[in-house]
Amino acid sequence: MAYMVKLDDIRLENIKNVVNGRIKIVGAGKNKCDIIGIYGQNGTGKTAIIDGMEIIQELMTGNSLGLKFFDSLYIGASESVIETGFTVDVGDKKYKAEYKVVIKFNETQTDYFIARESLKCVGIGDGSGEYVKCDFENPDAIISPKKNEERIISRDGRLRRELYARKVVARETRASFIFSKGDEAALTGRNLNEGIFDVIKVLKKYANIDLFVIKNSNSGVISLNQLIPFSFRIENGEARTVKGEAGIRLDGPTLVSIDRYKDINMLLAQLNLVVKCIVPDLQLCIKEYGEQADESGGSRMRFELLTRRGNSYLPLRSESEGIKKIISILSALVSFYNRESATVLIDELDAGIFEYLLGELLSVLDDNARGQLIFTSHNLRPIEVLDRRNIYFTTCNPKNRYIQLKNVKGAVNLRDFYYRSIELGGQRERLYDEADLSGLALALRLAGGYMKYEG
């Protein structure tokens, strides 16, 4: 089934330090792409957007939310909300879809659960609409509105019991009822109309195949020179799409299954077409240490990643952090460049990358890419090359975290304008909490009094 998905907006409520914030994607790319940059002071909600979309991806792929997401919630709030809007093309039909999830803490705030989720679907052109909602706190209803539950379940007692049991399991495992996995899907074509059922199927596929969420923790393991995580999407020789993450060791050989080793070879072939244009003459290659049997009697391959320039070979761990960062995200960027439905979110895109190169890369992507790229960054070079309508700035107000600068006229340099707005104000929200630089020297001296000297 041919499909296309575009992310239209993301709204957060009580996620990390964001009480309320919204990012709208306006389609300001020069081609068909969208590139959204999010900038601001440390601790003002840039990463919250990435965390929120990671939660949405986990739910739409039918996975359970683990305890790792506990730290993404706003402790003390009555509930946390993530709401996402999409434009969905299915065959010759087009829909506006909104998926919303509400998360709550337990009474002792030591755990959390999904309280409610809903999916609204409106046909573009004909205005037809339908929505399905699952309230995990209401034991009497499986889905709402009530007319949908009656239409779907009718008088089928067996189906009612089956769906109720699946709802209980979804709540206990912090999983989506609407987007439950594969053959275990609770809501199917037998009990939903064609429009919303097609949207559910397409959004599942989008989350599995075309949505990439790359966290800053990836840069952390690269910095430690222990592991390089690859977010990738490739088409193998059997016309099968392979998308996922592969962690390859930097501190020694990696051992993987033969099938995964074939995928990694295809990934390197894909990356080598591009990486030499970014880092002149650089190519990735593999040093094989041979096959060995695993505990189940199968075969696994031991190998190490190298880089080559001319006739000189080095272990990948010997390359700069910036080169390793580019390599690790490059396959995701290839998907963003070529696929309209690809959405790539990258936290701290600029980590370790030379600022001029970063600006040039984004300029090329903005001219010719087809998908969507949302990134956070501290490096201000990209705001000089991207359309100002696609740049968001975080504010000091947790109730209105994301804004676009107003009164930006003509060919003004947005970077300079941002600095002036920090220093002089003039925006509807304050953009920066001033550091106490006047007291810094004294504080540093006083802190030195707590140091113990030996010798």
Image (spheres, rainbow, N blue to C red):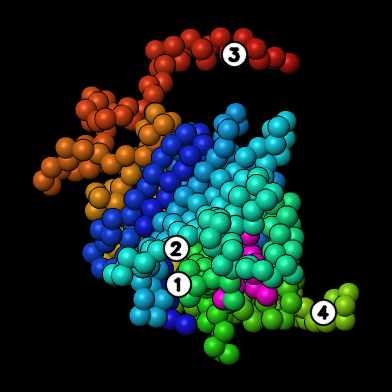
The kind of secondary structure element at disc 2 is strand
Residue visible at 36% across and 67% down?
128
Start-end of magenta stretch: 177-189
Choose mark 1 or mark 4, whichever is in front.
Answer: 1
Task: State the mark number for residue 195.
Answer: 1
Mark 3 sits on what residue?
448
In which quadrant is the C terminus drawn? top right
**What secondary structure is marked by label 4?**
strand
Q: Position of residue 426 (x, y in %)?
A: 21, 28
Of marks 2 and 3, the one in the foreground: 2
Say whether residue 136 is visible.
yes
Q: Splitting the image into 4 quarters, where does residue 336 fall?
A: bottom left
Image point (25%, 30%), residue name: 427
For the stretch drawn in magenta, the main secondary structure is: loop
Is 183 inside the magenta-drawn segment? yes
Sequence-first tag of 1 and 3: 1
Write the residue at 65% across / 37% down.
105
Callout 1–callout 2 Cβ contact below 8 Å = yes
In space, the residues marked 1 and 2 are separated at their CA atoms by 8 Å
In magenta stretch: residue 137 = no
Q: Looking at this view, is 308 or 347 the one in front?
A: 347
Question: Residue most toward the bottom?
Answer: 238
